Structures are given as C-alpha cells and as structure tokens.
Image: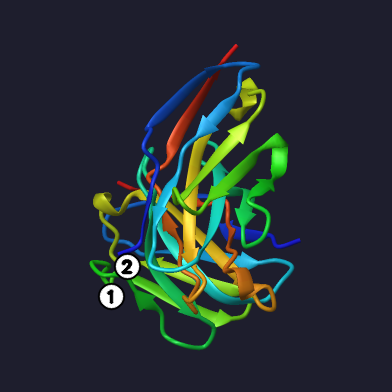
Amino acid sequence: GAVVSQHPSWVICKSGTSVKIECRSLDFQATTMFWYRQFPKQSLMLMATSNEGSKATYEQGVEKDKFLINHASLTLSTLTVTSAHPEDSSFYICSARARGRSSYNEQFFGPGTRLTVL
Amino acid sequence: AQSVAQPEDQVNVAEGNPLTVKCTYSVSGNPYLFWYVQYPNRGLQFLLKYITGDNLVKGSYGFEAEFNKSQTSFHLKKPSALVSDSALYFCAASMTTDSWGKFQFGAGTQVVVTP
C-alpha cells in the first residue's frame, strides 16, 4: 500500500514550452503533497507544499508563476513548469502524506520525473 | 533553524563488512526521523523511521538505526553490506509540531560497496 506514481517518468521539451507533471496517490487519499527538485547527486530541495482544494505554499526563492501547482483532488497533484528553460532541467519528485496516517508525518515518494529542456 | 547533517559525502565499504551511515540533527523539539535510499534516476525508497519508544529501529533490507537523543544522532547501520546496497542514502527529520509535516533532508551520503 501507499504507492505514489508520477507521469511522465521523463520528458524532453523545447525551450519556451510548458510541461505538466502528474503525481497520483494510487491506493490512499493524500491530505498533503510535496514537490521537490533534485540536482545530480544532491539532496532534495522542497519547492512547495499543497493541500487539496487550496493554494500551494511555495518555499522561498521558488517562482510561483513559473512552477504552477494544482492539487485538484485527494489523489492528484500537478506541477506545471511554464515557459521552460534549460536551467529548469532537473529531477522532480513528489511525495504525499496519507489521510489518517499523518500522525508520524510520514511521506510516500513518487519515482520522480526527469525533465530535460533543450 | 532545523537542520540535518550527513557528515560523509561518500562511504566506501567492502562487501560483507559492516556499513554505517552517519546522521545528526539539530531541531528545537522532538523529531520524527527517517532514512531513505535512492537508486539512480529513481525516487526515494523508505528504509525505516523513528517515532518514539525503542531507540533501536529495524527496517527494510536488513538495515537498522539507533536513535541517540543525547548525541542527537540517528546513524544507519547494516551488519553485512551487499554490493546492491550501493546507492545514495538520505536522512530526514520532521518536527512533531509541524502540521504540514515538512521534511528537512540531509545532503545525502553515497555508499559504495565493493565486491
């Protein structure tokens, strides 16, 4: 149980285009979802936290207009990288906290999405 | 400010030898502590967590970790390392008082197990 999926697993796009990444909790309802960014061999950097039905809370230094997050339901959150540029190339990972299992703050992680912007 | 430190960028160990990956934390209250492993181009896989109670926590794939409150440490251990344990390991802390449940990650430690 507690499986999180991400789609696509990898994407290549041209500079200036927008890319949407989906994060789904497959067998549980997620009260909160997190979006992270990871550079090669580095730690995860939290980008934003989102709760179902409300606006995402972005970490300092993360551009809200560039990284649009929508948490439309208890099982789906999307990250849209708008007007992508090569510097946005990275590994994006989402995680989710399970409703009813949040007392330990445990997060379940998706497999990640590799974004390459040409 | 909360922080998690993994003092070693890389740990090298021969297969069959004990493996230890260090983690210390600095928080202003009681933390939940976690260990995750990441293989190349993959997400994080959960290994174990400390919530409360017994200081020695046993987890997946033969890993265990010991919570030491006085030293604010949560070192990951495995008695006999396997080549397949070669991966990137992350320690994370989350405050019990944080309603969002945000994680503070360490920088990660690359484990290299040689045959």
- Describe the element under mark 2 as helix, strand or loop: loop
Left or right: residue A54 compared with residue B63? left
**Three-letter code, disc 2:** Thr
Q: Which mark is residue A82?
A: 2
Q: Which mark is residue A65?
A: 1
Upstream in the sequence, badge 2 or badge 1? Answer: 1
Residue B38 placement: quadrant: top right
Asked if residue B86 can be seen in this view, the reply is no
- Camera-nearest label, 2 or 1: 1
Badge 2: how crowded within 10 Å, few (<14), some, or many (20+)?
some
Is there CB contact under 8 Å for labels 2 and 1?
Answer: yes
Residue A74 in the image: above or below residue A3: below
**The numbered mark 2 sits on a residue in which chain?**
A
Q: Residue at x 66, y 38 (%)?
A: B63
- Residue A31 image offset from top left, x and y in percent: 59, 79
Asked if residue B73 can be seen in this view, the reply is yes
**Three-letter code, disc 1:** Asp
In the foreground, A83 or B96: B96
Left or right: residue B10 compared with residue A2? left
- Residue B78 image offset from top left, x and y in percent: 63, 31
Residue B47 in the image: above or below residue B115: below
> Same chain for marks 2 and 1?
yes
